[in-house]
Image (tube, helix red, strand yellow):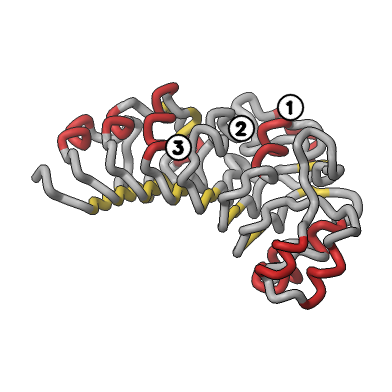
Amino acid sequence: VGRVRAVQYSFLNTKETIPAEIRHLKYLESLSISSNVNTMLLDIELGSEVCELEYLKYLTLFSYGIVSLPDDFVKLGKSLVALDLSANNFTSIPAMLTQENFPKLKSLSFVSSRRWNTIDLRRKDEYEDGVGLNVNASTDNVFRQLFLWENLEELRLSNNYIEGPLPDFIVGRNGVEGYTQEDADKFGGDTLKNLVNSKIPKILPNMKLLSINLNFFTGDAPDRLLYHPYLLEWYPESLIFMQ
């Protein structure tokens, strides 16, 4: 079984982490584990078995009841291209998920991480184990760093409890750059040429799909979103502005 390249598991009812035997599939490139039941009642701490898969490129851990990642999860940063941790019980985005730790990552998904359903976040403290993925977009530094992840091409954060205004970025501060003439030429000129001297920060420049809808964002949409070269590919009327 050492040459197996892809494995998919569906667990109907388990409170355990993924099978320890998975570490023996040395050349595994794609792993998908999903479909646990009663996930809102589970507090699964992901074990280190998956971290031994040094060739893993595509990892999906969907609707499993996971609340945390092991410290050595960063080992996967050498190979991982796509990571989907949607519909689990994270209360925040793991701090280890950075461009520095995962330089090859192109797609990151945290969709529908709502442990419990509520329409009133003023009551979120009534839930002892948390309502789900709940961060303040303007003050949470881990969330902010996601928007500085230059290599990302897909970022999915829809249907969570992310609240507050989107983080603000200013060209020239904290390493934030603006668009250059080279960028304008790369995208064929058009309206992007007007950004070269406009001080619009160059945020998520390679992003082909951004979904942040169905959260609790407040405030105005930043100009950097409205002028992004891939805005029309994001389906903004549904994946951006629908709050």
Q: Nearer the viewer, residue 53 or 149?
A: 149
- Judged from the image, the secondary structure of the residue bearing numbered disc 3 is loop
- Judged from the image, the secondary structure of the residue bearing numbered disc 2 is loop
User: What amino acid is found at the position of numbered circle 2 in the picture?
Assistant: Thr
10 Å crowding of disc 3: few (<14), some (14-19), many (20+): many
10 Å crowding of disc 1: few (<14), some (14-19), many (20+): few
Q: Nearer the viewer, mark 1 or mark 2?
A: 2
| Residue 242 appears anywhere in the view | no
Q: Give the residue drawn at x 89%, y 53%.
A: 199
Does label 2 or label 3 sit earlier along the sequence?
A: 3
User: What amino acid is found at the position of numbered circle 1 in the picture?
Assistant: Asp
Count up the numbered dots: 3
User: What amino acid is found at the position of numbered circle 3 in the picture?
Assistant: Gly
Vertical side of 30 occupied by 48: above or below: above
Task: Give the distance between the C-alpha atoms of the residues marked 1 and 3, in whole angstroms.
Answer: 20 Å
**In-image side of 171 versus 12 (left or right):** right
Q: Residue 152: x percent and y percent?
A: 57, 51
Asked if marks 1 and 2 touch (Cβ < 8 Å), the reply is no
Q: Which residue is mark 3?
A: 65
Task: Give the distance between the C-alpha atoms of the residues marked 2 and 3, in whole angstroms.
Answer: 12 Å
- Examine the image and state in which quarter residue 237 appears: bottom right
Q: Give the residue drawn at x 48%, y 38%.
A: 102
Label ID, residue 91? 2
**In-image side of 215 versus 93 (left or right):** right
Asked if marks 2 and 3 touch (Cβ < 8 Å), the reply is no
Q: Nearer the viewer, residue 233 or 194?
A: 194
Q: Which residue is mark 1?
A: 125
- Quarter of the image with the N terminus in it: top left
